Image (cartoon, rainbow, N blue to C red):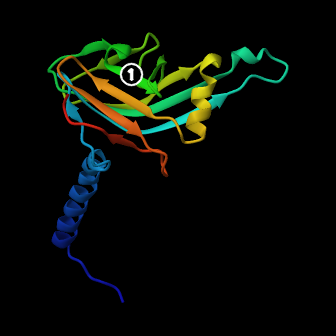
Amino acid sequence: MAMKMDRRAFLKTSAAMAVAVSMTGLLGGCSDGAGGTDLGGFTASAVKWDVKQNPPALSEDQSKWTADVMVWVRTINTKDSDWNIAGDAVMELTVDGVVVAMQGGGLLTNDMVLQFSRKHKANEDWVNFKLNYKQKKLYDAIVNKEAIVKFSIGTKKATDTYTALYSDGLPLKKDNALV
């Protein structure tokens, strides 16, 4: 059965659909339930994590073994201007209490700077941390789901700490409110 629609009804329906579609983009920022915390110039939240081993070929020196521990981070600039901050000044990853070296990732520039542009500009991407051959036991503990993996992001004003969970999707759970 065909439905008849006049021009006015079509325009009203089209406008309502356009508003509904444009609003769905706003819902994505709220989906993880752990909204960003104001950390003095920016808000941030850590969403998920992952780990990837980078073994050398059998014919290569086995001391070249590394593994990446990656954290998906969302940030929003709350200042009225563009500004930058060193990534290692505001982010830290520990595995069983051992600090893991930051290695960059898509959220950071090549010189590991977290860039903020335009007020309320949101950015999200991976931040990578590198385990070296001497830290292979930490990687093994992660694979065996025995390690305590903690990610902290913040400033002197406030810091949020997250604990990595070993459930589906490898989420992060916020440990505390402002410290």
Would residue 179 appear left or right of 148 to someone viewing this image? Answer: left
Give, as a three-letter code, the residue at label 1.
Glu
Whether residue 154 appears in this view of the structure is yes
Whether residue 106 appears in this view of the structure is no
Would residue 91 appear left or right of 104 to someone viewing this image? Answer: left
| Residue that appears at 44% across and 24% down | 97
Q: Quadrant of residue 60?
A: top right
Measured as percent of width and height from the top left, residue 17 is found at 25, 62
Give the labeled residue for mark 1. 92
In the image, farthest residue toward the right: 59
| Residue that appears at 35% across and 35% down | 162
Measured as percent of width and height from the top left, residue 138 is found at 57, 28
User: As displayed, is residue 19 above or below residue 29?
Assistant: below
Q: Nearer the viewer, residue 72 or 174?
A: 174
Q: Nearer the viewer, residue 31 or 81?
A: 31
Q: Quadrant of the C terminus?
A: top left
